[in-house]
Image (tube, rainbow, N blue to C red):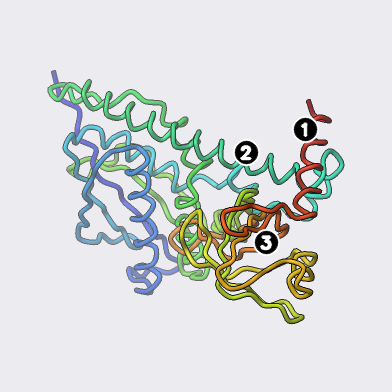
Amino acid sequence: MVNAPLVNKLELHYFFSDSSHSMDAFVRNKCESELLAIIREISSITGIEIRIETEAYAEGGLRERFKLLAKNQFVLTTLLAIITSVATTVPSGYLLHKLTTDPEVEELEKQKLRNEVEQGRLEQQKIKTEIERNELENHRLRLDMRQHERELNEASRVSPVINVTQVVTHINDTSYKVLKHRSSFYKALNSYPKVTQVSFTRLTSDNQEAGAPVSVVYQDFSQFIVSTDELPPIRDEQAVVEIISPVLKPGNYKWKGIYLKTGHSIDFYMKDQDFKEDVVKARIPFRNGSRIACVLDISRKLSETGEAVNTTYAVSIVTATFEGGTMIETSQGRNYRTSKNQLKLTFE
């Protein structure tokens, strides 16, 4: 029986508008960095540990070849198919929707069914559920890949039987890191018109094509670029903040405190005007080190590496203050709790 050739390389081919075989070094380095980041993230999601080596450049425009190494080399056939598909799939679906939806328009539509308080609670639960589901799905994918690796017959070099389309869809719908790095890859190329097209090709160990090249032309680069880095906000309805530095004078100044859930110091906007007025008029005993229970809204965005980072904190409602070990509910906190209870009865 003739063994199937080992598929363990990825060729990235840049096509140029002229007959040269060189390109801007900064653009090429940026693209290489972003592609490697995509491969690293896919490796992490699937649980396939790999090393990557580069080979000498080939001409014909400019061709870069990446050689992937793993404990079980034959699982790379599937991994390369996933990488090629992810790198050339235009982003769509829920993940992109959350980055491009106008929050004001979306909120107006939701307000027809429920008020802002209930919407925040449901959205928070939805985000939490999605995170848990994504973690479970990632874990399942890793188990599947490990099982397929165990089942591989090295003599026949059978590639793992796994639904590549399903894995690619999962990655595209859940990985902000892949979304960001792919966007940065095509953004670099979009600003460099000399590159008229890029293609991704899986190669065997002796540099033979293992499948048809998958190409993206310059006119389509912009479809991969994400127009915003803003992520859906998170609302913590049971936050406790220890005040380090309050700001009681008029103006939109930030307070400073310690968010006890994380133990980190945060700068935040105090949007509860009733609470500020009560403090100024000494109706509430207040000093540095005082703690408040509150509804804390956290704005987020994607970093350059695709990490979700918190950008802005805002206390919308102070629900209670603390005196010694006693929690004292504020009037606005009582109204907030009553409103939530009424909504629960309405939706039950």
Report helix, strand or loop for mark 2: helix
Which labelled disc corresponds to residue 344? 1
Residue that lies at the very extreme toward the right in this rendered image: 112
Are discs 3 and 2 less than 8 Å apart at CB? no
- Mark 3 or 1 closer to N-term? 3
Label 3 – label 2 distance at C-alpha: 21 Å
Q: Is residue 251 visible?
A: yes
**Quarter residue 245 falls in:** bottom right
- Depth-wise, is mark 3 or mark 2 nearer the camera? 3
As helix, strand or loop, the secondary structure at mark 3 comes to: strand
Would you say the residues marked 3 and 1 are in contact, meaning their CB atoms lie under 8 Å apart?
no
Mark 3 highlights which residue?
315
Q: Secondary structure at mark 1?
A: helix
Please name the residue shown 14% across and 22% down the image: 2
Q: Amino acid at mark 2?
A: Lys
Q: Quadrant of the C terminus?
A: top right
> For the point 22% across and 57% down, which residue is it?
54
Q: Mark 3 belongs to which amino acid?
A: Val
How would you rate the neighbour count of disc 3 (Cα within 10 Å): few for under 14, some for 14-19, many for 20 or more?
many
Residue 35 position in % (x across, y down) = 37, 56
Position in image of residue 170 (x %, y %): 48, 36
Residue 149 position by quadrant = top left
| Structural distance between the alpha carbons of marks 3 and 1 | 23 Å
Q: Amino acid at mark 1?
A: Lys
Q: x and y percent of residue 124 in the render?
A: 63, 44
Residue topped by disc 2: 126
Counting from the top left corner in percent of width and height, residue 74 is at 21, 32
Q: Is residue 131 left or right of residue 49?
A: right
